[in-house]
Image (cartoon, helix red, strand yellow):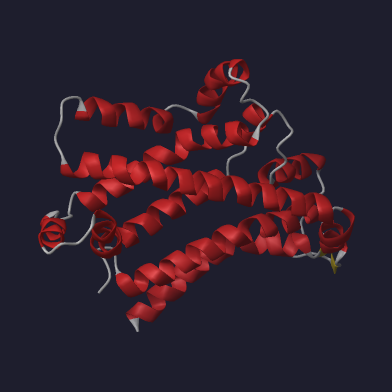
Amino acid sequence: MRGKTLLLCVLVSVTLPFLPLLLWSVADKWFYPALFPQAFGTRAWSYVFTTAGSQILDGLFTSFGLALTTTAVSLLLGVPAGRALGLYDFPGKKLTMLFLTLPIIVPPLSVSMGLHLWFIRLELAETFFGVVLIHLTFCLPYTIFVIRGVFSNYNPDFEAQARSLGAPPLTVIFRVMFPVILPGIIVAALFSFLLSWSQYLSTLIIGGGKMLTLPILLFSLIGSGDRPVAGAVSLVFILPAFLALLGSAHYLGRTGLKGIR
């Protein structure tokens, strides 16, 4: 009984903040001090699917492309780096970890403005690759620290046993190491995806307004004062991230954080 009550409280606390967005997206008239809309309509959703449908769809695809590319590169670089930090001691290890935390503790606006000049000189500004790189400055440290935590409890003797039995390097990676660290990889990928998906300032500064993503479009709609349309676009923006979080939670709930059972 207590477990069901706790679960209900968690669901209410998670879903309650989205209720105003849902109400705004279907509100035709909602004036103070009314607690609920006085009239309902579909103007906002008609705008999303017809008038601005192509623009929102372009922003959706751009956001997906940036988030997925950033996640893939972050994992490609973060797994070996996290393994090295988690399994080995070497000179400068603490300094390296401190260096990795700098993009996290420094405000994103300062990081983006500081790198903008270099990106202009390297002709990376206003390019897809440049925006991916600026997203990596925030996503890669989280990925490395998550993978480092996984490898800090990892026993490399299993790999040595597989090699002693004649397993080639790729087999050791994909049949021994990968299944054990897979839950950690999923958590790291979720962090990277959500961080990249929600980036606004860094995308606006490095993208120069040419990279139209859903956060940029959403902020412009919020500034316009059209709350029903902003509420509808907010729900479109939240849905992919919510589905990614739900899928990850479902998998981790079956396997646990220590590996596949």
Q: Is residue 29 visible?
A: no
**Rendered image quadrant of residue 27:** bottom right
From the image, which quarter does the N terminus lie in?
Answer: bottom left
> Residue 241 or 88: which is nearer the viewer?
88
> Residue 109 or 259: which is nearer the viewer?
259
What residue sits 30% from the left and 39% below the top? 81
What residue sits 31% from the left and 71% below the top? 255
| Position of residue 246 in the picture relative to residue 168 (left or right) | right
What residue sits 44% from the left and 26% below the top? 106
Q: Where 122 sits versus 81, above or below?
A: above
Instruction: Indicate the position of residue 127 as horizontal and vertical percent values.
Output: 66, 32
**Rendered image quadrant of residue 57:** bottom right
| Position of residue 243 in the picture relative to residue 141 (left or right) | right
Q: Is residue 49 visible?
A: yes
Instruction: Indicate the position of residue 227 as horizontal and vertical percent values.
Output: 78, 51
Q: Where 106 sits versus 12, above or below?
A: above
Instruction: Indicate the position of residue 17 as horizontal and vertical percent values.
Output: 59, 59
- Counting the numbered discs, the total is 0
Instruction: Indicate the position of residue 22 as horizontal and vertical percent values.
Output: 70, 64
From the image, which quarter does the C terminus lie in?
Answer: bottom left
